[in-house]
Image: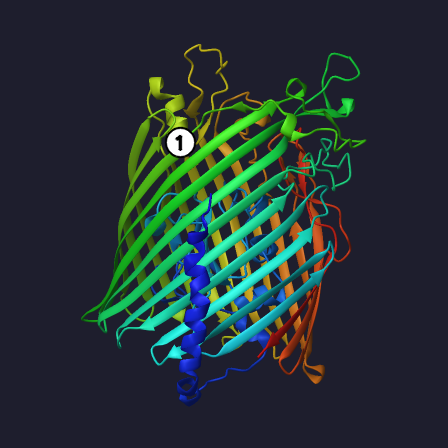
């Protein structure tokens, strides 16, 4: 558990900042202040990002599909966690919790902060956006730069930093479901060479799901030091506390046509169930220029994360009517109670050396980098199963909450320990600019991966090499076309390897993508449009062996048994159509299917030949329009999110849905009022599907959120 001295850094930072700020007040009065004003919608379009090459590159030149969701878009949509933004990302849909379907593939772990691994919300938490200034999304395999992961893409959260600009912002939030909260964010100069940031955030809300609520607290601070003309050091601290009552949420039971059988408010959890998380993140970023053409960027990130959970999990139907078949017609479901403690101590270090070399008419932008990520875990797990342990069955139609008490359960300790992992990678990339029209990117990465099971003492290691090559042609300054080939690998866990140790090791899952695309600017650079066509093949997919009886027959439980193919295209448009009308819009088509599998396997295996992958919609549309009303210093916006039919993990239909949103903002000097209405027409829908007994994950009903922001 956390001890009080773990917050010493957080609690001592404010006194340092206040005393330094007073001492430097006269100094900062003399510093030239530059204030940028303009229409909010000008900030939707971001034209540069490091996400695709780890170097500053125009998104027009980047030969890969990528999106940047700016801070202004986050503000305008009143996005408070990442799930609020999925409609703005082409080819991404919600799977469960913060996990997504990325170009057809489920991805829960390919998450980075400031370009390095270390997600404080890992383990069923949902990332909050108070400390995030923008969200960067790279589509397709990213292993050539970022290491092992799924081939659909990756998400990078860019956190807010200290600034020499004096800014103080107070925000109050009030909304449906007893939503209320407040945040304070301050930046400025302490000395001529030292800047600070200090912020705090708190919000609580009930849920439309029974027995569920949420409380989120975050305290952040940071200092930036200019250590000479060529060196900058930024240190930050981030303390997060997330208490989720009854929030190890599963879905709502449905029929095979995707119709909810009970109201979407259904929840198998009891009122006292909980999912509590506390995390401390310490980070240091160093940038140094040896010469104008030679630099180093290095980021060190330490994460201490603890999660406690106690919740009721649906297990199986009870044969109440005595017909010999237990199914949903019996209305009553068995539950087990799970009590879990997880703790991660993670350390990440990423160091990149960049060198700009001119060789005659050819320009090379060389990148040499290395990264490491270690995770030391603790894991305790106990459970109580069904009626024998004192757990009352739940009637899903006539809910009988409150008849069961976890303090009386006969918990069985599973005596499990954690799995420690170590990753190390080294990579090289060259961006070769032959002339103003042709650019080639070539990259190669070596990864080494090792896991150790503390419970059994089993150790497993693996390695791989992943290449990447891409060519861009710019016939005009505002138009580019490209072709990209990239690979990914995802090593198998030690737990899975141990299951098949007597039968030889499992091969890492590997992905290969070919992408062809076009990007162009319209209206003198006010609008950027992208179009990409891709094919991804994922091989060596690890799945349950359909021939395994689980009776010690010597048949392996897991196999590398096939290949999945994802075909699709995406298009996005971001920017200003007129002086008063801005837009961000996207459309994605995707078809992800098993092309090599096990003939005759039921779809519940998700690996029958020709099977369409679960929670992989074929069509998606995301739209957000904002219209500026200059005469009254206000704006109005309308949004749309469409997701076509999907299949759950149990093969049940997930019905298509269209949800509309809107917002209104008005400004009076330093005050900004925004009112956002999500799910304007109160549509009942499911965002994705799960198992038959757990049903589909319901979307939120209509919700109104008002925010008042005061800058002083």
Residue 488 percent across, percent down from the top left: 37, 43
The residue at the point 68 percent across, 53 percent down is: 205
Report which quarter residue 324 is drawn in. top right
From this view, report whether residue 442 is shown above or below residue 400.
below
- Identify the element where label 1 is drawn: loop
From this view, report whether residue 158 is shown above or below residue 484.
below
Residue 466 percent across, percent down from the top left: 31, 44
Residue 310 percent across, percent down from the top left: 59, 35
Position of the C terminus, as image quadrant, is bottom right
Q: Name the image colouring.
A: rainbow
Q: Is any atom of residue 706 visible in this view?
A: yes
Choose between 668 and 337: the one closer to the eye: 337
Residue 362 percent across, percent down from the top left: 23, 68
The residue at the point 62 percent across, 58 percent down is: 203
Task: Provide the residue designation for mark 1.
Answer: 540
Left or right: residue 687 versus residue 486 is right
Left or right: residue 652 versus residue 605 is right
Neighbor class of circle 1 (other Cα within 10 Å; few <14, some 14-19, many 20+) is some
């Amino acid at each position: 558990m956390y001890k009080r001295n773990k917050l010493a850094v957080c609690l001592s930072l404010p006194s340092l900042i206040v005393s330094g700020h007073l001492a430097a007040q006269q100094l900062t009065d003399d510093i030239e202040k530059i204030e940028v004003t303009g229409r909010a919608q000008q900030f939707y379009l971001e034209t540069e990002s490091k996400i695709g090459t780890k170097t500053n590159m125009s998104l027009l030149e980047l030969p890969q599909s990528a999106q940047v969701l700016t801070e202004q878009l986050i503000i305008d949509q009143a996005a408070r966690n990442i799930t609020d933004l999925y409609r703005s990302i082409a080819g991404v849909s919600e799977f469960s919790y913060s996990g997504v379907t990325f170009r057809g593939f489920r991805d829960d772990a390919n998450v980075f902060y400031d370009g390095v691994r270390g997600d404080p919300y890992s383990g069923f938490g949902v990332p909050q956006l108070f400390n995030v200034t923008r969200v960067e999304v790279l589509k397709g395999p990213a292993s050539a730069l970022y290491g092992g992961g799924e081939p659909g893409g990756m998400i990078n959260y860019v956190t807010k930093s200290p600034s020499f600009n004096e800014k103080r912002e107070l925000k109050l939030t009030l909304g449906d479901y007893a939503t209320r909260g407040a945040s304070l964010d301050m930046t400025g100069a302490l000395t001529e060479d030292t800047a600070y940031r200090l912020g705090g955030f708190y919000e609580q809300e009930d849920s439309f799901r029974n027995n569920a609520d949420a409380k989120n607290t975050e305290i952040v601070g940071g200092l930036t030091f200019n250590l000479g003309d060529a060196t900058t050091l930024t240190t930050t601290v981030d303390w997060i506390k997330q208490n989720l009552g009854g929030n190890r949420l599963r879905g709502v039971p449905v029929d095979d046509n995707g119709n909810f059988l009970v109201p979407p408010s259904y929840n198998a959890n009891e009122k006292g169930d909980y999912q509590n998380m506390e995390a401390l993140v310490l980070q240091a970023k160093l940038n140094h220029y040896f010469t104008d053409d030679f630099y180093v960027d290095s980021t060190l990130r330490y994460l201490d994360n603890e999660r406690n959970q106690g919740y009721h999990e649906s297990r199986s139907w009870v044969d109440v009517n005595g017909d010999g078949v237990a199914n949903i017609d019996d209305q009553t479901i068995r539950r087990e109670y799970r009590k879990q403690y997880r703790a991660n101590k993670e350390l990440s270090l990423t160091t990149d050396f960049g060198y700009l070399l001119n060789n005659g008419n050819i320009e090379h932008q060389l990148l040499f980098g290395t990264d490491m990520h270690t995770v030391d875990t603790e894991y305790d797990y106990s459970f109580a199963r069904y009626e024998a342990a004192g757990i009352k069955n739940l009637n899903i139609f006539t809910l009988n909450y409150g008849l069961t008490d976890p303090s009386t359960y006969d918990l069985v300790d599973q005596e499990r320990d954690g799995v420690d992992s170590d990753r190390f990678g080294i990579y090289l990339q060259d961006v070769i600019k032959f002339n103003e029209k042709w650019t080639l990117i070539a990259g190669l990465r070596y990864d080494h991966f090792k896991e150790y099971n503390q419970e059994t003492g089993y150790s497993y290691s693996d390695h791989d090499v992943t290449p990447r090559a891409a060519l861009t042609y710019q016939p005009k300054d505002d138009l580019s076309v490209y072709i990209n080939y990239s690979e990914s690998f995802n090593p198998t866990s030690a737990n899975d390897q141990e299951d098949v140790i007597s039968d030889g090791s499992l091969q890492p899952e590997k992905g290969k993508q070919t992408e062809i695309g076009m990007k162009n600017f319209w209206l003198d650079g006010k609008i950027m449009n992208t179009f990409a066509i891709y094919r991804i093949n994922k091989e060596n997919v690890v799945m349950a062996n359909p021939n395994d009886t689980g009776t010690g027959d010597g048949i392996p439980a897991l196999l590398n048994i096939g290949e999945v193919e994802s075909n699709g295209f995406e298009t996005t448009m971001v920017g200003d159509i007129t002086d008063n009308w801005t837009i961000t819009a996207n459309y994605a088509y995707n078809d992800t299917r098993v092309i090599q599998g096990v003939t005759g396997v039921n779809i519940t295996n998700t690996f029958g030949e020709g099977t369409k992958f679960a929670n992989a919609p074929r069509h998606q549309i995301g739209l957000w329009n904002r219209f500026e009303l200059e005469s009254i210093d206000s704006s109005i916006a309308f949004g749309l999110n469409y997701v076509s039919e999907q299949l759950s993990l149990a093969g049940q239909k997930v019905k298509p849905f269209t949800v509309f949103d809107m917002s209104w903002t008005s400004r009076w000097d330093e005050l900004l009022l925004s009112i956002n209405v999500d799910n304007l027409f109160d549509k009942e829908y499911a965002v994705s599907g799960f198992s038959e007994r757990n049903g589909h994950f319901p979307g939120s009903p209509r919700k109104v959120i008002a925010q008042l922001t005061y800058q002083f």
